[in-house]
Amino acid sequence: MRLLLVEDDAMIGEAIRTGLKRDGFTVDWVHDGESADQVLRTDAFDLLLLDLGLPRKGGFQVLQALRARQQTLPVLIITARDAVADRVQGLDAGADDYLVKPFDLDELAARIRALLRRKSGRTEPEIEHLGVALNPATHRVTRDGREVALSPKEFALLQLLMERPGNILSRAQIEERLYGWGEEVESNAVEVHIHGLRRKLGTDFILNVRGVGYRVRPAQ
Ligand code: CA
């Protein structure tokens, strides 16, 4: 899952980025509102972590512009402002949740998972499909009850495909969601991860739709 972090405080931003990467998220980071506004128009993210007090353009403005463009991605406000009025204003402007700094990184990761779960319409914390179960919180994957060991990128790719079984994702779409800016991507990286997943989960679970992309076998 790819997140955009908008935070002008270098220390806080670095701590959040490091913590969330360790939790398996792909995190891209911009330091001001204007840059956030720009990349939100061009890049695909699964969730936005938005500070309110930002240089060049405030967090509220970024949020209002995002919703005015009909972009539906979940927004979690992270702010030092603990005034009730700010939180109310943020939620009313289209944010989905907020955390007041300083906060615990485990709580942040759990709230992100909850928002992503809600976005995909799931009620259960585990994603389960055709005998394969994936837990975004514990990073555990099982097939028919037996644990399957995956690399972090294999896990992220499997989650992406399992969020909407039957939905076809192109290689470019997968690359965009799996790799942040500045991450070295080998030209055949997606194929390599797909190959690894098919080897570990069986070749009938992930299907290659020739010329289009990949998907999880739909339930019949
Ligand atoms: Ca700030």
Image (cartoon, rainbow, N blue to C red):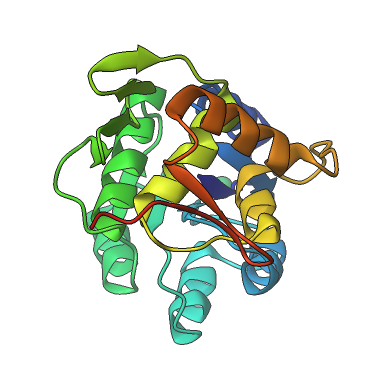
Displayed quadrant of residue 18 = top right
User: From the viewer's perspective, is 86 left or right of 220?
Assistant: right
Task: Determine the residue positioned at 50% across, 44% down.
Answer: 1
Q: Nearer the viewer, residue 8 or 141?
A: 141
Image coordinates of residue 208 in percent, x first then y, are 58, 53
Task: Determine the residue positioned at 54% across, 48% down.
Answer: 3
Task: Determine the residue positioned at 70% across, 41% down.
Answer: 191
Instruction: Count how many numbered circles sit on residues in the image.
Output: 0
Image coordinates of residue 176 in percent, x first then y, are 67, 54
Name the outermost residue toward the left.
123
Displayed quadrant of residue 164 = bottom left
Residue 21 visible here: no
Quadrant of the frame with the C terminus: bottom left
Task: Determine the residue positioned at 51% across, 50% down.
Answer: 207
The answer to whether residue 57 is above or below residue 144 is below
Q: Nearer the viewer, residue 108 or 88?
A: 108
Residue 40 visible here: yes
Q: Nearer the viewer, residue 64 or 75?
A: 75
Image coordinates of residue 12 in percent, x first then y, are 57, 31
The answer to whether residue 121 is above or below residue 124 is below
